[in-house]
Amino acid sequence: MEMLTVGQYNLIYNAFSFAIAVMGAATVFLFLGRSQVAHQYKTAVTISGLVTLIAFYHYWRIFDSWESAYTVTESAVKSTGIVFNDAYRYVDWLLTVPLLLLELILVMRLSREETINRGTNLATLAAVMVLLGYPGEISSDVGTRWQWWALSMIPFVAIVFKLVVGLSKSINAQPESVRELVSNARWITLLTWCFYPIVFTFPMLGVSGGTATTIVQVGYTVADILAKAAFGIYIWAIAVRKSEANA
């Protein structure tokens, strides 16, 4: 295990704790918020709530694993010999990342055929991206990490292309009252997702030890909060606006 300072340990500890609170609160808000949207948008909001619920559970498990991996005194952090299980994060992503894209597709209320085609394609690419990233994440070899990072970027770029180019016509066909909101949701997805490949590269750029661990764990946690809880509430806002406009 990497050597951590007490400050680094506490920063990661508090980030995990904050994520649990945010994901839990967002889950309650989204499930209660289903009553404020029209029937055709309830599925999108439900999926948003499921995303934050899954993230809540996995952050609870990550938090518990983090506590088990170290003992902390006022002056030092020592390993207990129990390995911190970061696989919880990738299991979470494997479930939630495809669902995040489905939220966006469903709230747009496209035709049934287009919803199925775009949803299936984007969700499959997202799952492949996560699976390709995991071998690099658990490797301590810089060359191996770069190799799997590059491979995972292939489906990532494909997703970006489909969101930027593929969805443009569908977004332009949205009702005028929500068109900007839907377009913003696409860009929020892209911007928040860019956190992940950037954070992934820090251990390959000469950052090591407790500093690398802190950047990776806190960076991923901030990205998750924005990409799941904040984005889910934004999807709910779109659903409310479209419901009010009967769009």
Image (cartoon, rainbow, N blue to C red):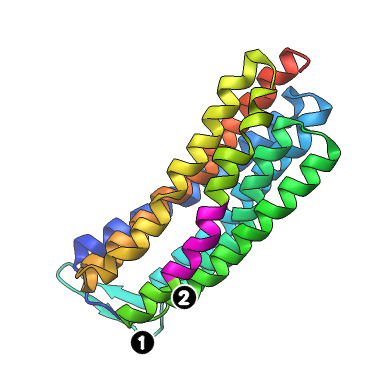
Asked if residue 15 is positioned above or below residue 25 in the image, the reply reads below
Q: Where is residue 141 in the image (x, y as percent from the top left)?
A: 32, 83
Q: Quadrant of residue 139?
A: bottom left
Q: In this view, does 172 lie to the left or right of 245?
A: left
Using a 10 Å C-alpha cutoff, classify the residue at mark 1 as few (fewer than 14 neighbours), some (14 to 19) or many (20 or more): few
- Which residue: 55% across, 63% down? 129
Local secondary structure at mark 2: loop
Local secondary structure at mark 1: loop
Tell me, for residue 85, which label it has, or none: 2
- Which residue: 70% across, 33% down? 107
Tell me how far mark 1 sits from mark 2, CA to CA: 12 Å
- Which residue: 44% across, 44% down? 192
Q: In this view, does 79 lie to the left or right of 51?
A: left
Q: Which amino acid does label 2 sit on?
A: Asn
Point out the residue furthest to the bottom here: 81
Tell me, for residue 81, which label it has, or none: 1
Q: Which amino acid does label 1 sit on?
A: Gly
SS majority, magenta: helix
Q: In this view, does 16 lie to the left or right of 103?
A: left
Q: In this view, does 3 lie to the left or right of 192?
A: left
Magenta residues span 149-158
Q: Can you say which quadrant of the picture contains the C terminus?
A: top right
Asked if one can make out residue 163 in the rendered structure from this viewpoint, the answer is yes
Q: Nearer the viewer, residue 217 or 98?
A: 98
Asked if residue 78 is positioned above or below residue 97 in the image, the reply reads below
